Image (spheres, grey):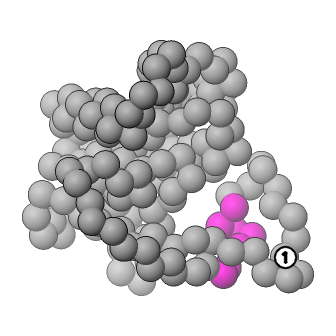
Amino acid sequence: MKICALTMVYRDHWALSQWYMHYGRLLGFENLYVIAHGRDDEISEICPNAKVVTIPRDNLDRFDGARSEILNEFQISLTQTYDWIIRTDADELVCLDPNHYSSFQALFSKRWGPAVFALGLEVAEQIGDTPVDMNIPVLSKRTAAMFLAITRRLERSTASHVLCVTV
């Protein structure tokens, strides 16, 4: 089973470093794809073994819709090589409960349909937490999370905080 991760980023280097290490350890760094929204040489330094594709940042009209279309088309092209594509923002890390799934392969082998969706929680800092060290996984230093229930009517797949995994 071949699995990759895909994100689009613009100058969010800290989140990208966390994303790269998290998914790289779980899927292999060679299975990571980063769409850079504008030229940014630091992305290749942060993600040395990922495949980085740069797209122009010259027109931001109707950006959310254009972003969704770009990601959708790129994701569709990856289905020619991969069985599953984990698509998240750079600040979104899908974490598995080790009591239920030891890996993404274990999760996806119990396929219920063509897509799997994740519940999003905001990692929270508590009084007494030590400052986050950018060189170690953030989840090793934060144990609190908040569930934010925000609803709105969604048109197509324009929501930016939706985990899209396709077959």
The residue range painted magenta reads: 138-144
The answer to whether residue 88 is visible is yes
The residue furthest left is 113
Q: Measured from the top left, where is residue 72 in percent x and y?
A: 25, 37
**Above/below status of 130 relative to 47:** below
**Above/below status of 88 relative to 142:** above
The answer to whether residue 106 is visible is no
Q: Measured from the top left, where is residue 167 in percent x and y?
A: 15, 49
Residue denoted by label 1? 129
Give me the residue at 78% from left, 50% from top. 134
Q: Measured from the top left, where is residue 116 in percent x and y?
A: 24, 64
Crowd tier of the residue under label 1, counting other residues whose Cα lies within 10 Å: few below 14, some 14–19, many 20 or above = few
Please tell me whether mark 1 sits on a helix, a strand or a loop: loop
On the picture, is 130 further left or further right than 152?
right
The residue lying toward the viewer, choosing from 21 and 52, is 52
Please name the amino acid that badge 1 sits on. Asp
Q: Measured from the top left, where is residue 135 in percent x and y?
A: 77, 49
Give me the residue at 43% from left, 74% from top. 150
The residue lying toward the viewer, choosing from 151 and 85, is 151
Q: Quadrant of residue 103?
A: bottom left
Q: Quadrant of residue 77?
A: top left
Give me the residue at 44% from left, 79% from top. 149
**Above/below status of 162 relative to 9:** below
Give me the residue at 58% from left, 33% from top. 10
On the picture, is 133 further left or further right than 82?
right
